[in-house]
Image: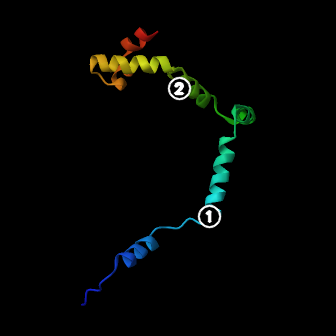
Amino acid sequence: MKNKSVTAIEWLENELKKIPFIKPQDAFEQAKAMEKEQKKDLAYWKANAEEDYIKVPISVLRYITELEKRMYSEEEVIAIVEKSRETGLTAEYLLLTEKFKKEMK
């Protein structure tokens, strides 16, 4: 079997052929879809929620409420990170300990 000598340009052309090409029209359509998604504001999501909430089981709504209760403000996140740095404990550990949660309140 003979080794075929390939120039750098030939090699590069072969490598570029392996890369999937995105057509400009596809890229344009993707950009339009992303822009449309970003334009959805709070009023849009509120209207959707009001239309769909009747179909959602109460257990799902309760789960969402419980998750929201566990969300932390920016100040709380900063306090957690600072406490983590001071103690050497991970932020995850601090969040899981009730003592630290009570200290933050």
Tag 2, which secondary structure?
helix
Eyeballing the image, is 70 above or below 8?
Answer: above
Residue 4 at x, y percent in the picture:
29, 86
The picture quadrant where one finds residue 56 is top right
Three-letter code for the amino acid on which mark 1 is drawn? Pro
Q: Which residue is mark 2?
A: 67
Q: Nearer the viewer, residue 70 or 54?
A: 70
The picture quadrant where one finds residue 100 is top left
In three-dimensional space, the C-alpha distance between marks 2 and 1, rounded to whole angstroms, equals 42 Å
Q: Is residue 81 left or right of residue 62?
A: left
Tag 1, which secondary structure?
helix
Of callouts 2 and 1, which one flags the residue occurring earlier in the amino acid sequence? 1
Which numbered marker is on residue 34?
A: none
Three-letter code for the amino acid on which mark 2 is drawn? Leu
Which numbered marker is on residue 24?
A: 1
Q: Residue at x 34, y 79 (%)?
A: 7
Q: Residue furthest bottom?
A: 1
The picture quadrant where one finds residue 99 is top left
